[in-house]
Amino acid sequence: MLYSFTNDYSEGCHPNILQRLTETNFTQQAGYGNDQFTLEAVAAIKTLCQKPEVEVHLVAGGTLANLIILGAFLKSYESVIAAETGHINNHEAGAIEATGHKIETVPTPDGKLTPATIQPLLNKFPEFHTVKPRIVYISNSTEIGTIYTKQELTDLSTFCKQNNLLLFMDGARLAMALSAPTNDVSLADVASLTDIFYLGATKCGGLIGEAIIITDPSLQKDFKYYIKQRGALMAKGRLFGMQFAELLRHNLMFELAAHANQMAQKIATQLQELGFTFLTPAQSNQIFPILPDTLIAELSKNYGFFVWKKMPENKSAVRLITSWATPEEKVDQFLQEVKVLSEKQN
Amino acid sequence: MLYSFTNDYSEGCHPNILQRLTETNFTQQAGYGNDQFTLEAVAAIKTLCQKPEVEVHLVAGGTLANLIILGAFLKSYESVIAAETGHINNHEAGAIEATGHKIETVPTPDGKLTPATIQPLLNKFPEFHTVKPRIVYISNSTEIGTIYTKQELTDLSTFCKQNNLLLFMDGARLAMALSAPTNDVSLADVASLTDIFYLGATKCGGLIGEAIIITDPSLQKDFKYYIKQRGALMAKGRLFGMQFAELLRHNLMFELAAHANQMAQKIATQLQELGFTFLTPAQSNQIFPILPDTLIAELSKNYGFFVWKKMPENKSAVRLITSWATPEEKVDQFLQEVKVLSEKQN
Amino acid sequence: MLYSFTNDYSEGCHPNILQRLTETNFTQQAGYGNDQFTLEAVAAIKTLCQKPEVEVHLVAGGTLANLIILGAFLKSYESVIAAETGHINNHEAGAIEATGHKIETVPTPDGKLTPATIQPLLNKFPEFHTVKPRIVYISNSTEIGTIYTKQELTDLSTFCKQNNLLLFMDGARLAMALSAPTNDVSLADVASLTDIFYLGATKCGGLIGEAIIITDPSLQKDFKYYIKQRGALMAKGRLFGMQFAELLRHNLMFELAAHANQMAQKIATQLQELGFTFLTPAQSNQIFPILPDTLIAELSKNYGFFVWKKMPENKSAVRLITSWATPEEKVDQFLQEVKVLSEKQN
Amino acid sequence: MLYSFTNDYSEGCHPNILQRLTETNFTQQAGYGNDQFTLEAVAAIKTLCQKPEVEVHLVAGGTLANLIILGAFLKSYESVIAAETGHINNHEAGAIEATGHKIETVPTPDGKLTPATIQPLLNKFPEFHTVKPRIVYISNSTEIGTIYTKQELTDLSTFCKQNNLLLFMDGARLAMALSAPTNDVSLADVASLTDIFYLGATKCGGLIGEAIIITDPSLQKDFKYYIKQRGALMAKGRLFGMQFAELLRHNLMFELAAHANQMAQKIATQLQELGFTFLTPAQSNQIFPILPDTLIAELSKNYGFFVWKKMPENKSAVRLITSWATPEEKVDQFLQEVKVLSEKQN
């Protein structure tokens, strides 16, 4: 295979992380997140959030973050509202239900929730016989590559406050969202508009780690118990601290995310020029072009990607993902092959 | 502080791991444990177990391993039996109960279970009104530094088979147990005598990772669902695979563990020569000498350790832990200081 | 209010039950379901099922039965498939999710599942990242008054067997389904075609109690532990045994159900004659006529019922429920009032 | 068998209940606890508690009450403290752990907790790695027949308030405790000194039902969701309301309990006169005399009771339980037989 566009976690991590891990390897550090690197990471996140009262916890992965957060903040009869395409609904093997909670879902064209689509779920009858919605879960960027605008987030935040709902953003690919060409949202906006969110390193330059940020001080007490209870309090917290300490130095994470986005946008632009359409707007580093099945079969010989959905007329939507580590020459090579193959097939 | 004997996870990892992470950093690998390093690690573990039919899964930490395993193999009305000192009982913030299961405990002098101490828990009355024991949880080495002999494990294994119980070994410090001076157990013995166990890297040369080994093929089906559901299936499984691939090459992990044990044994031997006694037998890299409180106060100025338990006559048991990274000169320095201080105090 | 058609649990129970409770009140009986009345009830159920190997357990209510059964037979990563209108999905305050399991739902016009609507939920991708369907939950009669034919149940049963799924029937109103005018299913058919089902007394002549019937012997072991663990093993099991012992004597329960159905059918027939249409086919004791809002407002002054759903043209579907205790003169009175009011309004 | 002293739920219920059930059988009532009988019962309980702000909920049984209450008021990392003999620890098949919570136990000679025995469980180390105690669970009368004095309850209540703990009393046999010869506690005292408790009908004159009383208004919000979610919200709440409406009219329940106690005390007094000793103080309707095994063998031919514990010198402690329905002539007959048999054996 020449290159895989299957996901954005095929490579290791940015070399700065490995270099500092090596340099500091024999320094003794306190365990369980009390090391100096974690402190450094937390300080950097607070600065980016422009909100010193946020509380930060580093955990290994996104599903772990989701189940800890939802398990912590929902009472047993309270539910979380998510888009049908939401990661917690489809790709976590029932992790949220395993903590005892119902996910109520909303069909969407683009993976994004709005006040209008949430509203019907709030009208429950009869009282006590149904679950009570308490958290709205959104992903930015979404599982299908779209991003939220500042206005959309503001509307959701206002709606949640009016309805006694918490707004929780899954930020496994938040760096890509905030570095996308059409983005108008800052990390400080996210910290201001959500009650809890996380910022992922795994898919943006790190080896492992998601930073949970609790922006609402009333939710912060005793949160570490939940982390420990779910098996997520790591002895060598230095490994997690280091990811964020390095990735947030001089904005590195967002530059890496911008590169990932640029590679995807380059592909999207040229596919559009070749006349192909897309399943969802190509806004970040995950794009979903609709290609003839014959072309897909040929491309699969040299490139890795995921066939997402059968479409009419012997076509399918495929998912192409680029990462911080995607070399531009691989993108060019791929585009050249698409061009040649589609000319040949026509 | 001159040196900390507080735990065995204060340093990073063996340099081989960082070196190979760096060398292979830009190789694209499949996610979720399907990378080549994990395959390499699994092969090495199968060889050490002398049992090709074992199934291996790598997860981030010990509490996570415990809750996944017990959550997977217990029906909701089944319990796990553990020593009162067992990690699952005392130091996991209710992680096992959070998966819905009762821990039934046995008081022990040395942290070790025996058929005689388990037997009374099997006589339940009346039927259906009590939980039904199904798994026996043991730690080797134990939370208080002791290790199991081959005969003890064989007796437990036989007893469990006779009583339809599964035997599960928490091996967060299994490398130290198997490298202890008085040990007569091999990893193949463990694989043969238990139904499930894990081998920890975090405390023995790795940055992160515990290898869950399911030795009973009838327990292996669909286990990966439980891993995913608990948030433990990591996108960049390469990080975990690398720990074990490197630590199991040429027996490195067990050499590192032997070093940790030797450092502790050196301290233990000299403290005994100075006339000090111990709370539990000093068998591995965790030792519990009983020292005068005045001596403890002085030592605390330069050395980190944990005061474990108040004892009569103004003494306390302290916990001293050495690791693969403990330099012998720090041990010598510490012993010299003990000697000088205790002479001064007498 | 002249009469309430709000539900079928507004009255007490058939007098035979009270009479026998009184007669046997001072007989000492064993607790926890080992009393003679429970034995009598179990024997009657086995006879009706024409399947002596079924196991029977009596519990207090439908939600309790649902959560015990699904909690018992699902592994933590397995899901239950239900119609969107299914009681477990909408009216149990997240009871199933509180046992740790995801409900996967299917939209339906009539509250009934078919192989064709279930099939798409079986195609999961990628493995281990999604839940694994294991149980198909159906209600007969459904929450919207429809009933299954023998052919439909046979098709579902075959499909489930082919796909390693268990078929579970919620029979809170099974007596009404089996006594409905168009029904062609017997209790023995249900016992033969499902793996687990329950037969409800609460809504058909009893004060309390649902009889869980496990038809598949491989599912029967240790089930009583689950009942105890969910708080459903009652000290005075005689109360539950008595409901079924009396209601199943000489087919009483099914005669009572037939009466409930006849009262609803009488209403349905006359409403149809008056030109009204229905939201769902009027097949059992729950019917959903669509009436003008002005008529509804008038009727509400004297009769209790539930306004189910707003419809176009200032109409609404209402839910009318009759029971074993509904007097025919109340039905006639109600119909007379509808007739007079609708003539006046036209 | 001449008579069973095995438990206090062998008979039905006080005839007043059956009579009123019969009289009101065809009155239509609202479902789910909104019926007039439940309202009547709630009013009676409020009066007895001398605390109009308490909230009352009626559920079917004790295990159900325990799991709903502890599941509702504990966060996932919080534990409940109980005596080792506590019902939740030994006889509920892991019901509390199934809601996700650890029970921390204290050994006691008499089944009663004190501040001194609870205190050591509050000193946890290290923070976040252990569960956090939040509720103290006591039973009155206890599972081994003893009762709390007002001073003991006051001390516990004060201690709990000082340590941010809730005090929860399991009152499955509270009527017997409050009617015991040496009792100095009133129901109003219980309402004043605990945060939550329940008053059982099942073992004191009713067919079924425990009244959960939440005395702390800050705990009352949304409690009915928990009841529904655990399957405990019964359609025909009239059945439960009737038990308490009748049993609390003119203090009937406490008179019935006093009778049960008197029967047990009569046995205890005469056994003492015959020279027998007791495992625990004989204070209520459960007594634990220590009898020669030969005598036990003879008595078992005509009387039902439970052999509780093997004792030295070929003796055993047996459990004898009397109830509201125990006829005095059965007690006399039993005592006569003990007398004759023990004379013969001497």
Image: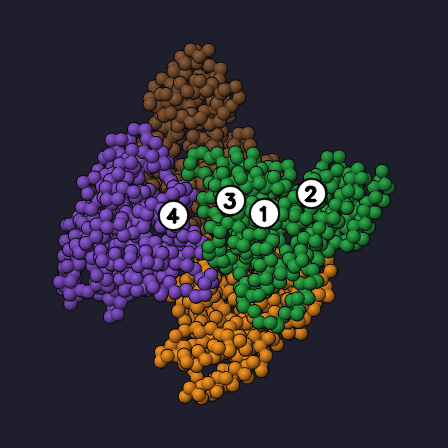
Chain colours: A purple, B brown, C orange, D green
Q: Which chain carries label 4?
A: A
Viewer-proximal residue among B249 and D297 = D297
* Amino acid on which the number 4 mark rests in the picture: Ile
Dot 2, crowdedness within 10 Å: few (<14), some or many (≥20)?
Answer: few
**Type of amino acid at the residue the image marks with label 2:** Thr
Q: Tell me how many marks there are.
A: 4
Q: Name the residue under label 4.
A: A68
Q: Residues within 10 Å of mark 1 (few under 14, many from 20)?
A: many
- Residue B321 is left or right of residue D88, and the answer is left
Q: Which amino acid, mark 3?
A: Leu
Q: How far, Cα to Cα, is label 2 from label 4? A: 50 Å
Q: Is mark 3 on a helix, strand or loop?
A: strand
Between disc 3 and disc 4, the foreground one is 3
- Residue B281: x, y in percent? 50, 25
Residue occupied by mark 1? D190
* Rendered view: A69 above or below C89: above
Residue at the image position 60 percent from the left and 53 percent from the top = D48
Residue type at mark 1 is Val
Among the two numbered marks 3 and 2 on one chain, the one whose residue lies closer to the N terminus: 3
Quadrant of the image for the N terminus of chain D? bottom right
Q: Which of marks 3 and 1 is nearer the N terminus?
A: 3
Residue that label 3 marks: D166
